[in-house]
Image: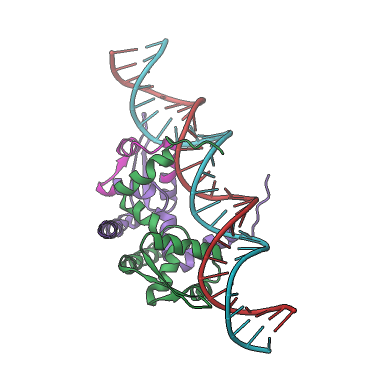
Chain colours: A green, B purple, C red, D cyan
Amino acid sequence: MTKIKENSTLNQNKGLAELTCPVTYVMNKIGGHWKSIIIYQMRTGPKRYSELRRAIPIITEKMLIQSLKQLEADHLVIRKAEPVVPPFVTYFLSDSGVELIPLMNAMADWAVQDNQRQLMG
Amino acid sequence: MTKIKENSTLNQNKGLAELTCPVTYVMNKIGGHWKSIIIYQMRTGPKRYSELRRAIPIITEKMLIQSLKQLEADHLVIRKAEPVVPPFVTYFLSDSGVELIPLMNAMADWAVQDNQRQLMG
DNA sequence: ACAAGTACTTACCCCAGAGTGTGTACCATG
DNA sequence: CATGGTACACACTCTGGGGTAAGTACTTGT
């Protein structure tokens, strides 16, 4: 049990930064390596767990499920499980999630432009 | 000298993820707690190092300078130093940096909407 | 009997990023 | 002569996100 410093800057901020900085708010929701990739996969409609796994072969099962749980907790994706065996679970975007798509497209546009500019010098 | 695993998934990806996922590309440029906050401060024009420090009192000098160096390396901000004493150094947004502003505004809009929705239930 | 598929769960490790603290070189001001 | 301001640099620690690997429960196919 290592003691936790409650007054460390790390702990002080999480909440504060979310309030002051909307970008941080967005980062906390779709940041990390995988979340945005998963959201992107779901842009075309509901996807089964195993579909996502095959669509993103490089991701580990732990990270996939962990990311999905976080996205679900943040109400960006919705999990629907049919009570059958073998399990049949689908994930799809909520309203908030769907509205991320144009935002991500804007990011993609900027990324392309920025990349061009770097190559030009 | 701890040995570094060159074939760890961490190292394999950095480049790969940047190519495949534009969101990751953007994250690598303006991710982390501070970069976007700093960029936001520079939206109104060039800022001195000490101006930024006072504008963001909670940031440490290390993180401020580190973030600025990274932003400079990524060509999002430009550093201009007058050879006088005491030092007079200003930072301002490059063209790529300026084009981030509308993107960040879009993030802010989404953040507000998403936050509303959570409060409603 | 055993592999394979579905959707997870758990334990453990590692490292990059963030935070803490101190030092530097120079000068103006009280 | 010491304090404060400017713009950094460097050494250290700590923590959480991400990665590795293995196990679970249940059924269908060969």
- Kindly identify the residue that appears in the image at 30 percent across and 37 percent down: B51
The quadrant of the picture occupied by the N terminus of chain B is top right
Would you place residue A57 above or below residue A25 in this image? Answer: below
- State left or right for residue D11 relative to residue D16: right
B49 or B15: nearer the eye?
Answer: B15
Measured as percent of width and height from the top left, residue A63 is found at 52, 62
- State left or right for residue D5 relative to residue A59: left
Q: Magenta stretch: give its range.
A: B42-67
- Kindly identify the residue that appears in the image at 50 percent across and 64 percent down: A65
- Kindly identify the residue that appears in the image at 40 percent across and 47 percent down: B33
Measured as percent of width and height from the top left, residue C22 is found at 50, 25
Measured as percent of width and height from the top left, residue C20 is found at 47, 32
Name the magenta segment's main secondary structure. helix
Residue A92 inside the magenta-drawn segment: no
Report if residue A35 is visible in the image: yes
A12 or B55: nearer the eye?
Answer: A12
- State left or right for residue C7 relative to residue A30: right
Q: Quadrant of residue A6?
A: top left
Measured as percent of width and height from the top left, residue A87 is found at 51, 75
B97 or B15: nearer the eye?
Answer: B15
Would you place residue B49 above or below residue A63 in this image? Answer: above
Q: Quadrant of residue B104?
A: bottom left
Would you place residue B52 above or below residue B25 in this image? Answer: above
Q: Quadrant of residue B5?
A: bottom right
